[in-house]
Image (tube, rainbow, N blue to C red):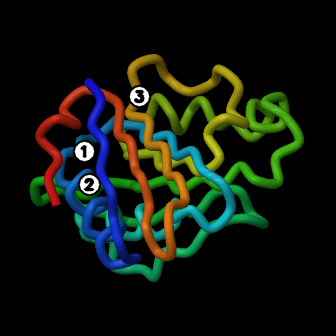
Amino acid sequence: MKKVFTTHSAAQTHALGAALGRRLAPGDVVALHGDLGSGKTCMIQGVCEALQVADYVTSPTFVLINEYAGRYRGGDLPVYHFDLYRLEGADELEELGAEEYFYDHGVCLVEWAERADGLLPEGCCHVWLEHGEACERRITLQGDGVDEVEI
C-alpha cells in the first residue's frame, strides 16, 4: 500500500510522524529516504513522541545509532534511531551488527536507508520525503497499514 501526503510546516511533518508512530508495533522497521533537510529527523521526532520516548530526539549522525526507551501498550519498547549518512558502505553497517536490531523486538527508524543496501527486512515501511515550495514537503509512505495513517 502507498499513500502520499503534503505537509506545509515542520509541525505537520512532525504530526505525520506521530500518526505513523501510533501504527507501529514491536519489530517494525521504518526506512526513511530523502535529501539533507527534507524532514527525516523531524518526522522521526513525531514517531518517537507517539512511542512515548521521553528523551530529546536528535539525529545520530556521528554515532550512527541512538537508543531510546519507548512504550507500547503499557510495556517497555526500545526504539533504535539510525542515521546512515556517514556510512561508507553496507559492510560497515553489517560489522556494527545492525541486522540484530532490525530483527529485534524494538522499533527501528533508519535515516538514509538507501545506504543499508539490502540489509533491511523485507516488508518494512518506507518513507520518501521530498522538498517542495518553501516549507512544503511531499511525503510518500509505503507499507502495510499506511492507508490508515491520517494527519
Quick one: label 1, few (<14), some, or many (20+) residues within 10 Å? some
Q: Is residue 40 left or right of residue 4?
A: right
* Percent x, y of residue 46: 33, 68
Give the spatial CA distance, label 1 vs label 3.
Answer: 11 Å
Whether residue 139 is situated above or below residue 11 in the rendered picture = above
Give the spatial CA distance, label 1 vs label 2.
Answer: 5 Å
For disc 3, the marked residue is 124
Q: Nearer the viewer, residue 76 or 20?
A: 20
Whether residue 34 is situated above or below residue 123 in the rendered picture = below
Give the residue furthest to the right. 88
First-in-chain label (2 vs 3)? 2
> Which residue: 63% across, 57% down?
65
Quick one: label 2, few (<14), some, or many (20+) residues within 10 Å? many
For disc 1, the marked residue is 24
* Percent x, y of residue 107: 38, 46
Q: Is residue 41 left or right of residue 2?
A: right
* Percent x, y of residue 16: 27, 60
> Which residue: 44% across, 42% down?
127
For disc 2, the marked residue is 21
